[in-house]
Amino acid sequence: MRVLRLLVPAVIAASLLPGAVARADTTTDPATTPPATTPTTTDAPAPTLPDAAIPTAIDVERVARKIESVERDEAVAQARAVSAQAALSDAEQKLAANEAQIAQVQSRVKAQALVAYEHTSSAQEAVTSIGAVQDLGAGSHYAQAALGVDDTQLAQLNSAEQGLAQTRDDAAAAGSHWSAEATALQTEHQELVDRRTQEQAQLDSWGAVPVMGDTWLTAAQLAAWFHSTGAQAQLAPGTTIEDLARLYVVEGTAEHVRGDLAFAQAVIETGSFAVAAGNNYSGIGVCDSCTGGYAFPTPLDGVRAQIQLLRNYADPDSRAADLANPPSPALYGSDPRHAAATYDSFFLKGKAPLWNQMGNGNWATDPTYAQKVVRLFAQMTAFAAAHPSS
């Protein structure tokens, strides 16, 4: 069972509205500045956030990316520490085996030297008694040959011991280094997690809702909520609301954008997906004084364009090169270099890291646009909490 973070700001949760929210006029286009328009709703504007809310929201996302980087480095350090420990154990085993061989050869050399000594002594006694010089020569030759073979083997073993000892020392040093590195990264990781937790708690206390972050609701929970409204989605042939919800979760996760909130935005923009011509679920290119908007060849393309544009609004560090997928061709152009340049030079890049800032020219002209999106998401979250089986 998935545990939900019920951190919808109290000021929003207290004003939950039943049913679907009507679609707001929008003027979202990655290349043009949206014109002002007269509000078409009587909803009161959202409470003003403190100046620190925007930099705090941006820092939360930067810290989140830093945490991911540190986690990767920590995993590498731990793997290398384990590898160094394995190399150390292997070198110690080989070193012990080599030392045992050295002991055996040294023992054999002593035994052979004793035999040769005794053989030579017997030969000297024979010379004294009967003058058998050839026996003395044979004894000396045997001693030299036997000792020569073992001396060569002993020299080889001693050389191997030096190499193994160096390997052991290198492995021990590497293990010590990577263990220390892993420990330092663990400390840094915890400090970053604590910092993000504190900043997120501060944002929650202000009623600030970041565009970026982890998706809370699953695709199944989003689809279950939608079905509970009784709405009938008019989607591309062969596409179900379950398919679409899954796309929002997957694409949102890929860009670290709140896919569930983007789904709520799409519900508002399309009147519960009653109007989603060209798989445009978020009013991209639609304006108050014009008709139509961008068209996307597939539902995936429509969701991806929305998620990428949300990231561009929210993340001042976003660049085409860092996206999980190339910039939407329908939105930024089919030429990769032009598309990347258009995405990177978005005139509102990083200007709206919070859903609270949406509207009044950020994505939509409606000054109450943000409240509509977040209120609807609060309904989705409440439904999921009340129906855990979903």
Image: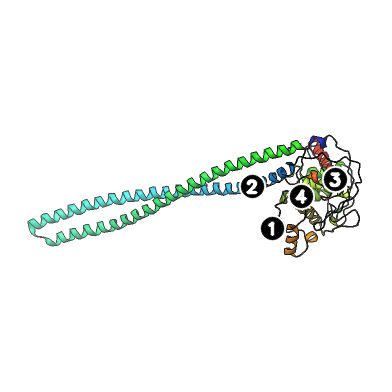
Secondary structure of the residue carrying numbered label 2: helix
Would you call the spot at circle 1 few (<14 residues within 10 Å), some (14-19), or many (20 or more)? few
Label 1 with label 2: CB-CB less than 8 Å: no
Q: Quadrant of residue 377?
A: top right
Give the residue type at disc 1: Ala
* Residue drawn at x 85%, y 45% as measured from the top left: 369
Q: Quadrant of residue 6?
A: top right
Secondary structure of the residue carrying numbered label 1: helix
Q: Name the image quarter holding the C terminus.
A: top right
- Towards the viewer: 19 or 227: 19
Left or right: where 167 falls relative to 39: left
Q: Name the image quarter holding the N terminus.
A: top right
Say which label, 3 or 1, has the lower sequence index: 1
> Circle 4 sits on which residue?
351
Say which label, 1 or 2, has the lower sequence index: 2
Give the residue type at disc 4: Lys
Numbered circle sitting on residue 369: 3
Left or right: where 135 falls relative to 67: left
Give the residue type at disc 3: Tyr
Left or right: where 91 falls relative to 127: right
> Circle 1 sits on which residue?
321
Label 3 with label 4: CB-CB less than 8 Å: no
Say which label, 4 or 1, has the lower sequence index: 1
Numbered circle sitting on residue 66: 2
